Amino acid sequence: MRLRLPFVALLALLPLVAFAAASVILVDRQQERSVEELIRHATDAAVRTVDGRILVTRSALEIMSTARSLEIGDRSVWNERAERALRQRSDWMALELRERGGATLLNHRPAEADGIDPAIRAAQAERVFRSGEVWVSGIITDPAGRVEPVFAVSVPIWGVGEVRQVLTAYVRAWSLNRVLMEQIVGPDWIIGLFDKDGRVVARSRSDTAFDPVVGQPVHESLAVALRSGAEFFLSNTRQGQEVLSAKAGSVAAPGWLLALGAPAAPIEAAARRTVYMIAGGGLGALA
């Protein structure tokens, strides 16, 4: 009889133990999915906002190129249009009109140095001459640090059967930092925007337009996670903080990626508290 009683008690308690274990697993999964859904929505919203900014620049350039013929020889017409565009668009640092033969007109803000590498400018235009398509460059930095980082948006101007000219706007990368800051859900969240070569274009933790991290390769931990193909992943920031992240690709700037991360420690702590509550309730019922 004494041996039978513990056995009967164990059988009676098995359903309760199984129910408690299943509840812990289900609640943990539900919390995980809720956090992932929140991060996914924030990531998609941030990418759409970045795409919107780039598409606005592209549309403005296309309107400039089709309003009237941009004959490169008519310097007065070009100067008037370029100066008006630079006054209206605070995020544009410079405008360039390049002819297939090599002649170039570059207008930039009076307070800005003409520090964008001529070789990079020529390569940007040459790609559009060859492809005949709109092209968004990666991040462009000035090694001397005189000019803040920019990226280029170029549109073709067609002649008879070929691209006759290329119109390019050099856009401040700092303007995208302001966009990213608007998408932050919590004070400890972080967003990074990276070009097709894996270099930082903008990040939410920049304090200045001359952030030395901009233009640098993405942190190795994040680079490995981005290459993994996973939609959600754990990675470490440059400060060593572990974050749960999601990524999304840009449509307006092919090859660009955006990653948004939330600190993993508070998420894991909340999950542990829930597990402890359920386990405690189960043990209380068991007692």
Image (cartoon, rainbow, N blue to C red):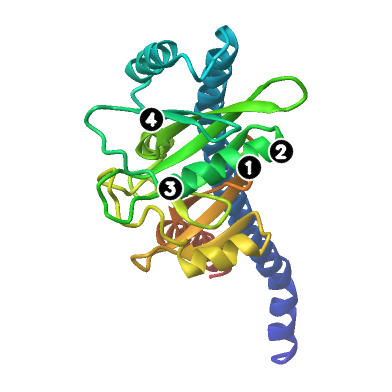
User: Picture quarter containing residue 6?
Assistant: bottom right
* Amino acid type at image mark 1: Arg
User: Residue at point 38% right, 11% down?
Assistant: 80
Above/below status of 135 relative to 274? above
Q: CA distance from mark 1 to mark 2?
A: 6 Å
Is disc 1 in contact with disc 4, using a CB cutoff of under 8 Å? Answer: no
Label 2 to label 4, Cα distance in Å?
23 Å
Q: Do residues under tags 2 and 3 come within 8 Å of each other at their CB atoms? A: no
The residue that mark 4 highlights is 94
The answer to whether one can see residue 284 in this image is no
From the viewer's side, name the closer residue of 149 and 23. 149
Q: CA distance from mark 2 to mark 3?
A: 21 Å
Q: Which residue is mark 3?
A: 140
Check contact, mark 1 vs mark 2: CB within 8 A.
yes
Q: Earlier in the sequence, mark 2 or mark 4?
A: 4
Q: Between 1 and 65, which is closer to the camera in this rendering? A: 65
Q: Residue furthest left?
A: 111
The crowding category of the residue bearing disc 1, from other C-alpha atoms within 10 Å (few below 14, some 14 to 19, many at least 20), is: some
Check disc 1 and report the residue beneath it: 127
Residue 131 in the image, given as x and y percentages of width and height:
71, 38
The residue identified by callout 2 is 131
Q: Are marks 2 and 4 in contact (CB under 8 Å)?
A: no
